Image (cartoon, grey):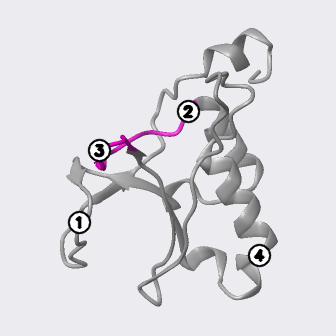
Amino acid sequence: MFYNLKKGTIIDNGTSSLIQRHDVLLNTHAEEIALKRIFKIHLRKHKLNDLRLIIWKQNNHGLIKPINCCGWCTKLIIKYNFPLDHVLTFNQEFDAPFVINRSTNILRSAISDNPVLPIKKHIRGCCH
């Protein structure tokens, strides 16, 4: 989800692209899709410093869980020069649908100090 902090509005949302075989190299992570859309579409109307990228994991029952960026996505965020502190996830789990109270701090950084590399990308040498 792309969120404009200055205007307090959700600009866009999307999902990762999942291939049936669950092969990490064939799947496109949500962060990669979001970064491409931000730089292709949204920077025409919004300033980069006002944008926040909010990521999470959701199961088939609607339970929303916080998730950190993997090593591949963290490097991609750095490559795009997107501010690392603008990539966020939720502090806790939620049952969808949920209402976000703007006065409550429910977000935290989705960038970890030691991001996990997807096994397939690490084996193929994509993340050196």
Q: CA distance from mark 3 to mark 2?
A: 24 Å
Tell me the tag on residue 70.
Answer: 2
* Side (left or right) of 85 relative to 120: left
Q: Element under label 3? A: loop
Question: Between disc 4 and disc 3, whose residue precedes?
Answer: 4
Q: CA distance from mark 4 to mark 2?
A: 24 Å
Q: Which residue is mark 1?
A: 98
Question: Between disc 1 and disc 3, whose residue precedes?
Answer: 3
Picture residue at 39% right of the left edge, 52% below the top: 89
Q: Element under label 2? A: loop
Q: Which residue is mark 4?
A: 41
Picture residue at 60% right of the left edge, 30% below the top: 71
Q: Which residues are magenta?
A: 58-70
Q: Which residue is mark 3?
A: 61
* Side (left or right) of 113 relative to 101: right
* Side (left or right) of 74 relative to 110: right
Question: Could you say where residue 125 lies in the image, as x and y percent from the top left?
Answer: 80, 15
Q: CA distance from mark 1 to mark 3?
A: 13 Å
Q: Specify the amino acid type for callout 1.
A: Phe
Closer to us: mark 1 or mark 2? 1
Tell me the tag on residue 13.
Answer: none
Question: Could you say where residue 84 lies in the image, as x and y percent from the top left?
Answer: 56, 53
Q: CA distance from mark 1 to mark 2?
A: 26 Å
Q: Quadrant of residue 72?
A: top right
Q: Element under label 4? A: loop
Residue 65 highlighted magenta (yes or no): yes
Estimate how packed mark 1 is, as few (under 14), some (14 to 19) or many (20 or more) residues with alpha carbons within 10 Å. Answer: few
